[in-house]
Image (spheres, coloured by chain):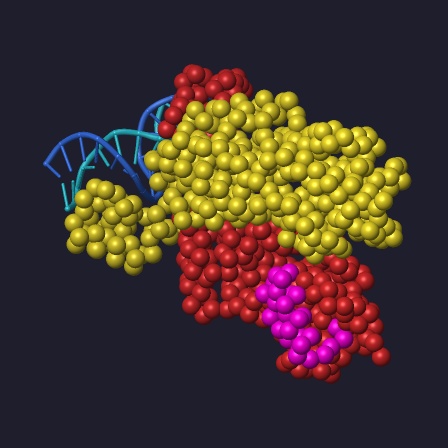
Chain colours: A yellow, B red, C cyan, D blue
Amino acid sequence: MTGGSRVSLRHVAELAGVSVATASRVMSDSSHPVSGSTRDRVLSAAESLGFEPNRLARALVTARSQTIGVIVHDISDPYFGDIVKGLEDGIHASDYRLFVASSDRDPEKELNYVRAFQAQQVDALVFAASGLNDPTYERDLTALVERYRRAGGVAVVLSDHSLAAPRVRFDNRGALTEMVAYLAERGHRRVAYITGPPELAVCEVRFGGYRAAVKDLGLDADEALVEDGRFTLRGGGEAVATLLGRTDFTAVLAANDLMAIGATRELVVRGVAVPGSVSVAGLDDIAIAEYGPVPLTTMRLPTYELGQRGASLLLRILDGQEPDDQLIVGEIIERESVTSAPV
Amino acid sequence: MTGGSRVSLRHVAELAGVSVATASRVMSDSSHPVSGSTRDRVLSAAESLGFEPNRLARALVTARSQTIGVIVHDISDPYFGDIVKGLEDGIHASDYRLFVASSDRDPEKELNYVRAFQAQQVDALVFAASGLNDPTYERDLTALVERYRRAGGVAVVLSDHSLAAPRVRFDNRGALTEMVAYLAERGHRRVAYITGPPELAVCEVRFGGYRAAVKDLGLDADEALVEDGRFTLRGGGEAVATLLGRTDFTAVLAANDLMAIGATRELVVRGVAVPGSVSVAGLDDIAIAEYGPVPLTTMRLPTYELGQRGASLLLRILDGQEPDDQLIVGEIIERESVTSAPV
DNA sequence: TTGTAAGCGTTATCAC
DNA sequence: GTGATAACGCTTACAA
């Protein structure tokens, strides 16, 4: 923008009767000494002109844009919305701004966003979106980030991702084994599993947790028990319908709450009592989990906190400190959708 | 970022054996003629060096940052998430990037974000967040935006806002009168109303629609019938509990779906049949409206489309065309939470 | 404590 | 068709 009447440091300097350098020193809180009286003159000149320093120009010389690029899969998904909120709140005091990009899980689009962010000279890159299972993508992204790092950039990961970088991690595998164990303790031996899009690294990890727990606990490991629900409400309903027509089970565990809610509704509509005939459990504990057709038993993944801790990790790295990976743990939230298996 | 080994146009020019000017011309798709052979040399030099033009530097000289600032109240609210998604998709092809800021409905915070965006030289400002009922805020914001405009900036509004600017508007008042009429047609004469935060312009408008319709249709206009639900799930539940203890009614209309869902759950938990004893209607038609305790009858507010049309409006203005205000209309989605009033 | 001037990486103007 | 060179608005040696 601009072209019109933008007021620059030069105007302030002229009005205050000082050099641009001096004006700069006071406006940028430089450590370089400036006398109290000139400082006041500059300040009031800036005030009266409504001067706002051009951060692009500043960024060009300091090589610090005070911006951060965030990659999510879909900003309209509350899961990511919460993370971004946490990030934003976490960096707000430090005077950074956030660029947000939704990749739609498209490898090409995601790579392009990363390139765009680099061109935009962002100081840091946050991968809130889980990695994509695509060898080309993984290779290209690694190379891109590597180059970005050499140019002084910082990358942080808040998801399951093949990228090597400092991270705040939620133990997705552990979460799933724990949920399966929870169900097994209540007598469920045939636990159906609704998975998300197979191209997402997080789905692979969660599914791995399910499979490992089923095996370790000696539950029925039957391929007919798993179905893709695409991480959506509708997909969850469709998946459970497919499962119902194909095999039988006393519990269904979904890889996220959206699918669990969709499945619950489908079951209820079909006259299958939840949890009377079939128990349903989810993962994430999104805000509406409590307000579905049946209040959902699930595991809480503290997304807002994930964002906040991501922000503080980032800030510490940007500040030159040593990064320390962090682990966030879940917690089972017992509501009404799970009960003991019918005998 | 950077400081390290960033490759600039100068490196590309040297490797290609041309001047920086020529290199610039090919990298920026200038209309200035360049011979095919030198173009190729520059392109391959850029390729081999992994050159990515520094958009900050470009922005500084062209006075175009290719960035847009978006103000929302809360990015973790799917309502705003959807709008931002629509915006992003709408501008994606035009090579703009989005800065997103959540104001938390705090006037001071919002003003600061606007100032920050200006300093960041955004080419446009999008107010997806509704205005705040605060005279100081309205005055300061108007002044700020006025100055921003004089400097060449573009502002667009996608909400109920006192700011004078090109806009894409959803008829909130009309939506509410229509919902009240819908309920009245089904015999409801005592329609309780759960409103949102009074400081939001949008709540004032929606409430105005409710009141006007109640009056026009001769329904019971009783102050005891309205209660604040803070736009949240929990607030909706609390509001209906308060209403239940204070007066009686056969229907409750909420200013958004979240509160309608919260209210529905509270009613069901208390053994009040929905819609048997009390009908419930919402507004927005968020994704989960269909998946609540009772599938919700509501009015669809196409948020994603709002964002998309906002983007195209913006792009047209940025392209120098005349802005034309747009109106988006709602549509009642009949599900199961509303029925005729008990006789 | 203040000022001068050299850049940051581009694009734009003007010669050639 | 190509190349110097002056901006853009700021920070930062280096001088004074």
- Tally of marks: 0
- Could you tell me which residue is drawn at 59 percent across and 35 percent down? A171
Based on the displayed image, in which of its 4 quarters is residue A324 positioned?
top left
| Picture residue at 38% right of the left edge, 25% below the top | B4
- The quarter of the picture where residue A316 lies is top left
Q: Position of residue B312 (x, y in %)?
A: 61, 49
- The magenta stretch spans residue A51: no
The residue positioned 44% from the left and 57% from the top of the image is B109
Viewer can see residue B92: no
Residue B46 or residue B340, whichever sits in front: B340
Q: In front here: A283 or A184?
A: A184
Viewer-closest of A45 and B28: A45
Q: Is residue B329 left or right of residue C11?
A: right
Against A284, residue D1 (above or below) is above
Region of the chain picked out in magenta, as a range? B225-251
Residue D1: x, y in percent? 48, 21
| Residue A243 at x, y percent in the picture | 84, 39
* Image quarter of the C terminus of chain A: top right
Query: Is B214 or A58 nearer to us in this picture?
Result: B214
Does residue A164 lie above or below A255 as drawn? above
Question: Image height check: is B212 above or below A252?
Answer: below
